Amino acid sequence: MFIESRELVMKHKIPVAKTSKYWQGLEEGKVYKTVCRNCGRAHYPPRAECLCGGEVKWVEIDEEGVVEAFTVVYAIPRGFEWSKPYTIAIARFGDIRVMGWAENVKVGDKVAIKTGKDESGVWKVYFEVV
Amino acid sequence: MRVGIIGVGCSKFGRRDDVTIQELSYEAVKEALDDAQLTQDDIELSIVGCVGTRSYELMPAVPINEYCGFTGKGPMRVEAACATGSAAVYTAYTSIVSGVADVAIAIGVEKMTEVDTPTSLAIGGRGGNYLWEFHQYGTTFPGYYAMHASAHMAEFGTTEKQLAMVAVKAHRNAAKNPKAHFQKEITIEDALGSRYITYPLKLYDCSPISDGSAAAVMASEEKIRELGTDDVVWIESVGYGSDTSNMTNRESFVGLKASVIAAETTYKKAGIDRPVEQLDMATVHDCFTIAEIMAYEDLGFCRKGEGGKFVESGESDLGGKLPVNTFGGLKAKGHPLAATGVAMVYEVVKQLRGEAGNLQIDLKNYRALTHNVGGTGHFAFVMIFGR
Ligand SMILES: [Zn+2]
């Protein structure tokens, strides 16, 4: 025997003011990391303040990457009902790694970094095998 | 100061449509109190581990505490994703060591089946860093481990068949455990022929979505002497490790650094340098088959990259050199998140006391290990128990 709970819909407003350069970059086809002007450490996901206290600069990731891990998601989570099975990959670009969507990749593949808008209207990183 | 486990309880795992989260908690609590021959009056502090969000009580600690009869004694709620149970045991342990309480109970409970599977996947997929992972890329909990599997397979040639062998072993043990979610054996062919959940992990590579609870009553050595308890399993050492929320920021994908750190810490304290020879059994965190293979390596049961061969060798079977997950593991016993770490303690205590029935291992060192990972290596606890 069950009682149905009252419905609770949660949709959060995520503040991205400090990383707005990144989110705007995606819409211009650019993927940015941050690099500390003081200690030289690179940050991805980008952060606007380095742990050393140094100031960061925004640097475009435009070199070739190498896939280090991937999966093809068949059991689709709530929020992605609109999608067919999708591939998530993690690729290394020099001193940082980036997560993105890809097609027909395997570990070791060389990829180019792109951006795009998915069917739900969210901008993100895509990889293309080169 | 030494801390001992004097009572343990564990509910039947599985789809538990018959109980609320409070009622489910009490099943384990009652068994643990009876086992310790104590009542609620004897408990000074309750630690409630619950990840929550999949069950209707979003702030479940107080309702659970009230139903179990511990009002006014805690509750202290802890959360460390899938390692929440160990976080509860760890918190009870440190509370006793610090003198805050002489007798404490660690409760781990999870009700996961009150929401549907896509919702459960979307909650688990938030186990990393929401904005940079799930929001954009739809990461799922099986998906994170599948990415580790892809890297492990590429670097070491680990095969889908070796992954399947972990599942077959788990089901073989769970078939003899009446509290397990699944009580049926499977074949390698069943496992290899099942559908992909998230490549390269198939249905039988994944632990089920389960409800369940477990509890452990713990006390200081002085209190144990005062109570006159004679059958005590001692916590010899505890180790803890953690890692980044973003998977992209990990050092490597072929293992979990948090597990390595937790193991090094606990081994050093317990004087363990040859775990396979010095321990009688281990419970490792096998939420997915690849997780058990990485655990063998990260815990030093074999060299890095040889986890697949270790399961093939049969050394982790019942009757092997170091039986692993004798009650069926998360894979087949079930993985009600916060219950898991405490249920590992339940398993180790039952084994070390010689009360494991037809799953009983041979005891020679009277020492055993629990390894419980939260998220995809975001947290890890490794503890050594002895009798
Ligand atoms: Zn810096």
Image (tube, helix red, strand yellow):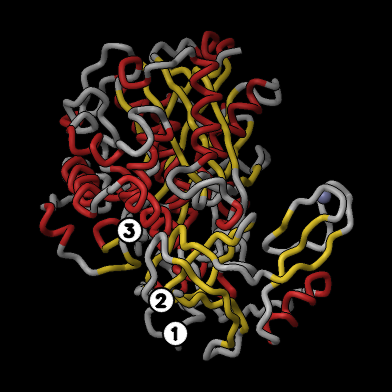
- Rendered view: B298 above or below A103: above
* Labels 1 and 2: the sequence-earlier one: 2
- Name the amino acid, label 2: Ile
Residue highlighted by disc 3: B208
Name the residue: 87% across, 50% down.
A38
> CB atoms at circles 1 and 2 under 8 Å apart?
yes
Residue highlighted by disc 2: A76
What secondary structure is found at the residue carrying circle 3? Answer: loop
Task: Please report, as a chain letter, where disc 1 is located.
Answer: A
- Name the amino acid, label 3: Pro
> CB atoms at circles 3 and 2 under 8 Å apart?
no
Task: Please report, as a chain letter, where disc 3 is located.
Answer: B
Residue highlighted by disc 1: A81
C-alpha gap between disc 1 and disc 3: 21 Å
Residue B302 in which image quadrant: top left
- Name the amino acid, label 1: Glu
Q: Is residue A58 left or right of residue B262?
A: right
Mark 1 or 3: the one toward you:
1
Task: Please report, as a chain letter, where disc 2 is located.
Answer: A
Name the residue: 53% across, 74% down.
A112
Mark 3 or 2: the one toward you:
2
